[in-house]
Image (cartoon, coloured by chain):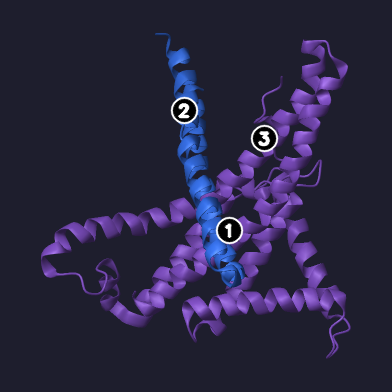
Amino acid sequence: MDASAAGLLGMGIAAAGFAGSGIGIGLIFSKMIEAVARQPAAEAQISKYMWIGFALVEAIALFGMVIAFIIMGLRG
Amino acid sequence: MENPLHHFELHPILPLHLFGIDISINKAVIMMWIACGLVLLFFYLATRRASLVPRRLQSVAEKAVEFLRGMAVQNIGPLGHKFFPFIATLFFFVLANNVIGLIPGSYTPTSQIIVTGFFALLVYGVSLVLGFARHGLHFFTVLTPAGTPGWLFPLMIPIEVISQLSRPITLAVRLFANMTAGHIILTVLFSLMLVAPVYLGVFYIGIVPFAMSILIYGLELFVAFIQAYIFTILACVYLGESVKLH
């Protein structure tokens, strides 16, 4: 395989990390809805932690993008 | 389609060298100065005619400061009052840097990893100095959470060392990647808006990426705030851990 083609494929595979983050964000919001349905009074408290969790999970996906950047930098 | 990373490149406007170190003034530096100026201007305007019953701007500033002080004290303990200026400066500077990049034609200083990396190293350095100053060599017990049985030490200590050392890296990369990714998405959508009608031959198809770009712009505004908040709350948690040793 051509070296530059392998680099492009690697960048694409690094983007696959976003799938895990998608599952994570889905879990966070589904649990949030479940929790609010059980205890509507606690919504304000739960939503604070939900947004923190959302930002942390989203950031994990972006680490995959950083790896794509590293590969891009190595390709020159 | 032009390279979406093109607008992250920095070129010196005023080349400066001090003892062999490149301290050239570039777009990011000027934007950071503007961000500093905006924060100072906001607090000047908010506290210019401070009254017991706050007006609109003053109540915004008071709410923000109260919120940050609560966050610092809740995570660090009574020492949080002393660290509140540091925490508040960090929050408002990161927030101003994040938000200023959303103005078309400007630049996001936090999309350079050297900027966020320095913030992260500063936070981590302060937490280490604080820990050693308060506890001396006893600070090393931070590597073994309370109640860990002795036979787990060979396993726990390497894991905790890695988790400690990855803190400044994750802190820096999280902010940098969020800001950079948002701007790349916006660039791609804007280029698509211009390119798609030409390639597909349908003039109105450009509306789809344009509508998407408005939604993503709103998300980016939200992300700018939430990432500043995350950065600050993690700084509070790390400082708090240095004070309380788990």
Which amino acid, by three-letter code, is at mark 3?
Ile
| Mark-to-mark CA distance, 2 and 3 | 19 Å
Chain coloured blue here: A
Q: Quadrant of residue B241?
A: bottom left
Q: Colour of chain B?
A: purple
Towards the viewer: B158 or B133: B158
Percent position (x, y) of residue B127?
43, 70
Instruction: Identify residue for label 2.
Output: A71
Which amino acid, by three-letter code, is at mark 1?
Trp
Residues flagged by tags 2 and 3 on a common chain:
no
Looking at the rendered structure, the secondary structure element under dot 3 is helix
Residue at horizontal 72%, vertical 76%? B63
Residue B185: image tag:
3
Percent position (x, y) of residue B222?
69, 53
Q: Quadrant of residue B150?
A: bottom left
Quarter occupied by the C terminus of chain B: bottom left
| Mark-to-mark CA distance, 2 and 1 | 31 Å
Residue B205: image tag:
none
